[in-house]
Amino acid sequence: MSTAGQPWYQIMNVEEIPSPALLLFPDRVESNIQGMLERVGGDAERLCPHVKTVKTEAIIRMMVRSGIKQFKCATIAEGETAIKAGAASVLLAIQPTTCNAKRWINLAKAHPDRDFGTIIDCKESIESLSELSKQHRITLKLWIDLNIGMNRTGILPGEEAVKLGEWIHSHVNVELGGIHAYDGHLHQSSIQERQEACEYWHSKLDAFVSLLKKNGFDRLPIIAGGTPTFPMQAANPEFICSPGTTVLWDAGYASQYADLDFSWACVVLARVISKPATDLLCLDLGHKAVASEMAPPRMICLNLKVDEWVSHSEEHLVIRSSDGHLFSVGDTVYAIPWHICPTVALHQHFHVVENRFAKEKWMIEARNRMLAF
C-alpha cells in the first residue's frame, strides 16, 4: 500500500494500537541527537543530556552509540537506566538526602568502573555524603550547585560557594567534580533577550571562576544551562551543555524557540470515544495520558482543528471543533504534547514506528521511582 502524501505521523496499523499511547519515531530521535552534536561542533564530550525527558534505556543507548557518554538525571532510577544503557558518567541533579543518598551510593558501588556525581549546595550534604562514601569505600564526585537566578536550589556564587569547595577537599571519599549552573528561569522567546539574560549570569559565573582560581581551584568543568539556552551555552567552548527536551521535542518549546530547530519525535495517539454534539468531540486523552500541569492548550492536534478546549479531566478531553462532523467515534487523533517530559512519565512504553508501522515496544523503565536500587 502506498503511503505517498500521507502525514509523517500517520501509521498503517493504527487499529492494533490501544489508546491513549505514545508513538516514537527513532529516525527523528536520531536526527535530534545529531542536531545536538552539531550545536557543539561534533564534540560529544561537551554534551551531558538530561535523561528526565526520555527515561528509556533504548533511547539513551542511541545517544551512547553517537558518542555521548555523560548524562544528567533527576532520579536514581533514571541514573540506573543510563548506566544500563552504557553511560560512563552520571550526575544526579537533585541533592540527595537520607535514604536517597544511600541508594545513589549503592548504585555507584555496584558500578566501580563508572563515574558518579551529585550536586550539593551545603556543608551538611558534603559531610553526610563523605561519611556514606567512606562506609561503602567509594569516591563520589560532588558538584557545587550555583543559584544563578532561579532561586530553586543552589548557593549564590561567591565566597561561601568557594568555602564549599574547600570543605569538599577537607573530607574523605569525596572530590570536587565541578560547577553546576542551571538557568531554568530563562525562557524568553526573543533570541536577543535570552542572549542578554545569559550574558548577565555568565558575567557572574566568570567572576566566580576567577575567585575559584585565586583560591587554588583551576579549570573545573562547568555543566551549564538546559534546553532554552542551549544555543547560548553551546557557543561557549568552556561549557558542557545539558539539554533534555531536544531529544523528543514538544509543542511548548517549538512554539517559543524559533532558534531551536529540532523535530517532534513522539506523538500521542488518541481516539474519539464520544460525540456529545456535532461540534463536540470527547477523546480518551485525560490527565493520566498527557501532561496537564499548565493551562490549555496542553497539546496541539495534528489532524484535528481545535476551536475550543472545553474540558479536561482524568480520562477525558472534550474539544469543540468546526470539523467535528468529519470525525466519528473510534477515529484516531494524533497530538503533540505541550510538555513532553511529564507526558512520557505517564506511560509504560513507547510504540516504536518504523516504515509507517508500530511493531516494537520500548519500555520507559525510569518512569518508575525505584528499579533495582
Image (cartoon, grey):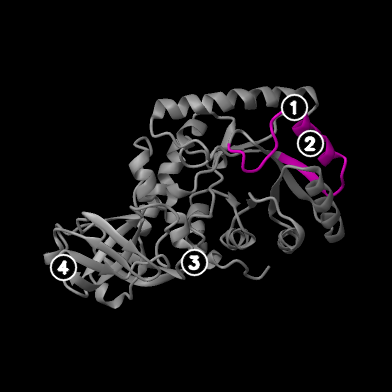
Q: In the figure, 16 relative to 356: above or below? A: below
**Which amino acid type is marked by label 3?**
Ile
Residue placed under numbered mark 1 in the picture = 212
Whether the residues at callouts 3 and 4 have beta carbons within 8 Å, the answer is: no
Left or right of residue 173: residue 201: left
N-terminal of the two: label 4 or label 1? 1
Q: What x and y, as percent, mark residue 365?
A: 53, 67
Q: Which residue is mark 4?
A: 327
Farthest residue in the left direction? 325
Q: How many C-alpha atoms fall within 10 Å of the one at disc 1: few (<14), some, or many (≥20)?
A: many
- Residue at image position (45%, 39%) is 228
**Disc 3: which residue:** 364
Q: Give the distance between the C-alpha atoms of the residues marked 1 and 3, in whole angstroms.
A: 41 Å
Residue type at mark 4 is Phe
Can I make out residue 289 in this image? yes
Residue 195, percent across and down? 46, 27
Whether residue 355 appears in this view of the structure is no
Position of residue 21 relative to residue 310, above or below, is: below
Q: Are marks 1 and 2 in contact (CB under 8 Å)?
A: yes
